[in-house]
Image (tube, grey):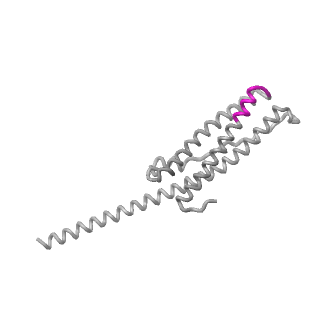
Amino acid sequence: MKEYLKQLSIVILGILIAFWLSNIGEIYEERSTQKQLLRTILNELKDNNASIKTSIISLDSLHMNYLNIQNKTTESGAVTINYLGLQLKSIGYETAKFTGILKDLDYQLSSKIVGNYESQNSLEGTEKLVVDELLVLIKNKITEGDELEYFLLQVLNFKNHLVSFDTEQKQLIEDLSVFLGVEHE
């Protein structure tokens, strides 16, 4: 009987060790997946940051063109409008939401990531309003008046939102880089 209990306790101990090792493997795999997904988000944020910089330059140009129209300082009356749009990505974030990876992160970092992408959605909505207003001005050949003033104000407000968002996003990129232990350019 004593020998039987000894063998049984060895078997039970072996099973417990196997479960423990299996659990450690799962935790390691989850963390590895989490880091990989966070690296994807980091790269996505860097790409979005470049798009924001391009959009800010485009908005400055657009604003200047319409100021010239308003002040009638264009020589031929023809103006080139070149605005590519934000083209912000969110695939990494959507994947992180779907997999639930963000819930296991530090609360502050997770909140910053979620807040960043929610702000991004808001910016895309604002951008659509500005572009729609631009199309109305072009369609109606409006070169002066309250509608043009309103459009110029929208462009400036949108640009200011982008600049503010850009600053917050740069901080998030830095925080995420530190969390992942990667070099930040």
Residue that sits furthest to the front in the current view: 108
Please identify the quarter of the rendering in which residue 174 is found.
Answer: bottom right
Image quadrant containing the N terminus = bottom left
Is residue 47 inside the magenta stretch? Answer: no
Which of the 4 quarters of the picture holds residue 147? top right
Taking the spot 22% from the left edge, 70% from the top edge, the residue there is 10
Q: In the image, residue 78 lies at what x, y percent?
A: 83, 35
Quadrant including the C terminus: bottom right
Residue range highlighted in magenta: 144-154
Number of numbered tags placed on the structure image: 0
Residue placed at 47% from the left, 50% from the top?
107
Residue lying at 79% horizontally and 38% vertically, measured from the top left: 65
Give the farthest residue toward the right: 75
Camera-nearest residue between 154 and 74: 154
Helix, strand or loop: magenta stretch: helix
> In the figure, 152 relative to 3: above or below?
above
x, y percentage for residue 61? 77, 42
